[in-house]
Amino acid sequence: MAGLKIDNANLEWTASGTPRSVEYGDIYHDAADPLGESRHVFLQANRIAERLGSHEGEFVIAEIGFGAAINFIQTAALWLAAGRRVPLHYLAFELHPLARADLARSIARFPELADVAERLFAQYPPPVTGCHRLHLFENLQLDLYFGDAVEQLNAHGEGLRGKVHAWYLDGFSPGRNPRMWCGELFEAVAENSRPEATISTYSAAGEVRRGLQRVGFAIERIPGFIGKRHMLRGDFVSDLPAEKAADFSHFPNPWFRLPTEVAASRTAAVIGAGLAGSSTAWHLARKGWQVKVFERAAKLEHGVNTLRQLALRCRIFAQDNPLARFFLAGFLYSVREFQWVSHGEGLEWHDCGLVQLRDGKRRRYDPAVLENLYPDEVLQWRSKEQLRDLTGLPLARAGWCSPAAGWLDPLELCRTWLNHPAIELNPGSGIDEIVWSNDGWRLRSESGELSDRNFPVVVIACAAGALRFAQLEGLPLLAVPGEVPSIRETANSSAIRHIVQGERSIFPAHQGRHCISANFGTEKDSRKNTVVDSLATVRQLFDPPSHLHAESVGNMTAERCQSIDFAPILGAAPDFPACGKLYAQLARNARATGLPPPAHHPGLFLNLAHGSHGLCSSPLAAEYLASLIQDQAPPLSREISTALDPLRFLIRDLKRQQAFGFRATDSRNAPIAPCINSDPGVNRGNPASGV
């Protein structure tokens, strides 16, 4: 892996205000008329205006070399001027993204682009490798892939395959940046192109023309922009994508494959109205789906929604791995989503920041290692004195601050997500059985069927309640009960403006009370002094220990759902018995090759086990599922989706020659969780597992 962070572009500026790359020794665009150059080379050569006016369905444009964003902003402006007739999905790849300040400086010269540019600046991500999905307008989304273009195309290849209608090749010249114009890149471009795809580039180099021709493009030289004699444009005429789409033998781990079925109608049922279910419903609805949400409880105010404060914080890892990438991408995505929803829907998003003291298990973490892994928006190491200056509080130890973190009311968030005209909430409607019937799923309760229709798509997002469905028997879910104290605000405690986290966390006061993070475990009766212990632990965050008000103490209970490997369970629902037969060979040879694709239940998807990090992981998980269901390029790489796939448990058990299944239950037939550390989300033993 290349690492979580990448380097921003190193720029210098010409006298005319044009950005110039120090790495490649070249300017980003024509100095005299960059907007005219962009229109001529890319928008007009690919007939974007004409195609947006006649195309049906989502139109996908991919750009290699996002640079100063001029091509994207002009394309978006053209789409807006055309009346937003079709959904626009823009994919942009960039190895050295401009820093936010440099991007703003470059675009400030063009006030006519301000509408789109301001929205881009508001969501522009830090330099973190991978895909960043930005929703800039309704029906316009921008996927920024930061990192080497070939590596990113290969990492996301299965989800992108055969989806791109138009390509902009806008990297630095072949002589200055040969990696951008290599045969491997051209092959990836061809694999991800639709049969009617077009391509254009300012380069007229023979090696570029021949490379594109080799992978199936009919290329012609046409007049270049002012001052340049020629450029290239082309049409894709090969059937290579269809051939490649049917051949995944070169993929490692063939049992992890995205579903290929596309629903006949845009109607879905979501089982569960918590964070996972509500977010899934909303992400489907804004992609044009009609969604029915079925919730067993009579009202939304139950479970985690009884808590009035829930923290958005990034789950931190001490090394780069697929889960570290998922939770970092999820954190940044959630920040953007909560900002979007707070501006558009009135959600109260409290971006107060979080301070994490270095105590307990976090003493194992080397600040220098984390500084190299995470951007400043997520994690900054600060001395004890610096944290005191930042917060104005007598904090007891050094630690990290997370400026982008914050909190919100989960009940308000779920209500906001569900308040969409395409979503119908059905409270008091517990689903006990789902049955496939020819063209869809029938939903049944103990009293009978709850709907007069079949649903082509069903998403199970009801936490540990998912185990009541026969299709998911043996899925290793843990239902972990917890207690969440709250205390009355005092004159001293009102100075708390950040979330302060140690072995326990305390939130800024809301409506006169501070919430304290949950104490999770199973032996409830043996923990009679939970509240007292929690208050004593919180006091130790301060030096001298803070005298928090111990009277008028509230105490709420809730359950969190997690998997036995502490990662969410996300993706198409496998047919476990069928997959057990398909991959039985793994029990004899864990490195067996030539295995078939997995068997999935048609139209059935899972969004489960977000544990104590639901605000960090649920929104991106919901967008990922909605993209799969929509047959849209998903925002997660194959490596990340593999780490979250529900089939991972069966494959693991087969390789270990163990029987698949998880049978530990309590008297309510809910899974029994092992006694875990009181700090939510910590997997004992290895700091690489994340906290």
Image (spheres, helix red, strand yellow):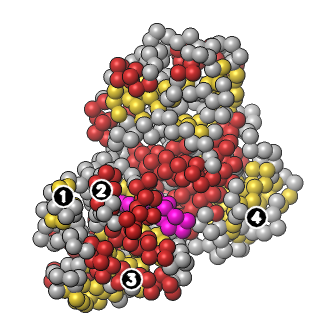
Res. 278 in view: no
Query: In the rendered structure, which amino acid carries the disc numbered 4?
Result: Arg
Q: Which residue is mark 2?
A: 105
Which is closer to the viewer, label 3 or label 2?
2
Q: Which residue is mark 1?
A: 13
Query: From the viewer's perspective, is the residue at label 4 or at label 1 nearer?
Result: 1
Q: Earlier in the sequence, mark 1 or mark 3?
A: 1
- Of the residues under marks 4 and 3, which one precedes in the sequence? 3
- Residue at horizontal 27%, vertical 32%? 368
Residue named by callout 4: 442
Residue at 69%, 18% in the rendered image:
553
| Magenta highlight on residue 483 | no
Residue shown at the point (81%, 45%) measured from the top left: 298
Residue 440 place in picture, x, y as percent: 70, 69
Q: Nearer the viewer, mark 4 or mark 2?
A: 2
Q: Which is more N-terminal, label 1 or label 4?
A: 1
As helix, strand or loop, the secondary structure at mark 4 comes to strand
Residue at which label 3 appears:
197
Which residue of the protein is positioned furthest toward the right in this rendering?
447
* Disc 1 from disc 3: Cα separation: 35 Å
Q: Which mark is residue 593?
A: none
Quarter in which the C terminus is drawn: top left
- Mark 4 Cα shell of 10 Å, populated few (<14), some (14-19), many (≥20): some
**Amino acid identity at mark 3:** Ala
Instruction: Tell me whether the residue at label 1 lies in contact with that at label 2, contact meaning CB atoms closer than 8 angstroms.
Output: yes
Disc 4 and disc 3 in contact, CB within 8 angstroms: no
Identify the element where label 3 is drawn: strand
Q: Secondary structure at mark 1?
A: strand
Horizontal arrangement in the rendering, residue 568 relative to residue 388 (left or right): right
